[in-house]
Image: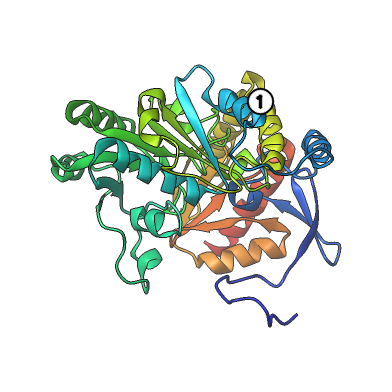
Amino acid sequence: MTNSYLLPNYARQPVEFVKGESVFLFDSNGEKYLDFTSGIGVANLGYTQPELIAALTEQAGLLWHTPNLYRNSLQEKVAAQLAGSRDMLAFFCNSGTEANEAAIKLIRKHTGKQQIITFDQSFHGRTFGSMSATGQSAVHDGFGSVVEGFVHVPFNDSHALKEAVTEETAAIFLELVQGEGGVVPADDAWLSDVVQLCRTHGLLLAVDEVQTGMGRTGKLYASDVYRIEPDIVTLAKGLGNGIPVGAMLAKRPLAASFSPGTHGSTFGGNKLALSVAAKVVDLIDSPEFLTEVERLGRFSLEYLAEGLKNCRTVTAIRGKGLMLGIEATTDIPQLIASLAEKKLLVLRAGQSVIRLLPPLVISQKELQAGLDIIIETLTKEG
């Protein structure tokens, strides 16, 4: 198949998926694949989930869109679901990078300062503000001057972080598990230092939960796993299970800095998107569901550790919940291609990590089947 009408900014694989069922995808030739990508952490509830289809279909027959000039009770409902017992208010948008742009604007507007500390190997998006926050030079290359004010320091390094804080610092902005950077979780002791620094210097703490949120790490938010209370949380990906929707949550005292006219989005909080998001949160945010995700995450780490203990090419296995990374010295693109040939889809993270993001509804049997393919393939190669 030739591509004559699309810009070449994606390195697309020569396969097209045309149907999904639960944790499986089917290509245009009818081949069935076990999906350990969830569309890059999006389809947390898998594919063709009946309750999500029903919610979307019902709203599609009523009204697709109204601008944010009028009340939207769906936004109010989902905001309350996302806040739970947290004293936070929501702004809705369409993607993770937009949620992070909103966070950057709110930080600057509320504090009157421009300097935001982010981290090496972080990833916050590809629009100019979120790209500038991202701690990867490859994301910046070729685009000229980035947005000023971002300081990047090594992740999990307390000394470097303390050295970076100045009187001009407004906030610390981080992922609790760096996804694109290699599935690297925050160290507990380091994170305690982050929280203490914010308290001592009056800094805002903003957490990018675009990938870690919506149950991925075994709690609704990764900040719940680490038992911290950020001032700002950004969400997208799993919030709509494939329908584009993002959100920024901010503690109530910050609300005055987002008065009418300071920020907006034409499609943000769209009724179609929010009808699905309401059902997604309802299904994910239950103790039984999240406990099972947490259990499957522990099972995966233990199963991989045992199965790969004699594999010389594997240097680390890490993650939280069903966000897992296997670091290896093997050729990662070739490994991903080999797994795809065996009808298992996985992702790359950083330069040397395969990233596993299976749908959260996966059964242990399905999960084990995929892990066995990975173990077999890596063991043969190393």
- Give coordinates of residue 242: x percent, y percent: 68, 47
Residue plotted at (51% across, 48% down): 96
The answer to whether residue 109 is seen in the rendering is: yes
Residue plotted at (79% across, 37% down): 59
**Element under disc 1:** helix
The answer to whether residue 135 is seen in the rendering is: no
Query: Which residue type does callout 1 highlight?
Result: Phe
Q: Indicate the quadrant where residue 333 lies.
A: bottom right
- Give coordinates of residue 74: x percent, y percent: 66, 30
Residue plotted at (48% across, 27% down): 89
Residue behind mark 1: 289
Which one is nearer the viewer's eye here, 237 or 254? 254
Which one is nearer the viewer's eye here, 59 or 317? 59
- Give coordinates of residue 78: x percent, y percent: 61, 29
Which one is nearer the viewer's eye here, 35 or 268? 268
Q: How is the image coloured?
A: rainbow
Asked if residue 80 lies left or right of residue 155, the reply is right
Asked if residue 153 lies left or right of residue 233, the reply is left
Residue plotted at (57% across, 23% down): 80
- Give coordinates of residue 219: x percent, y percent: 54, 27
Image quarter of the N terminus: bottom right
Q: Indicate the quadrant where residue 238 lies.
A: top right
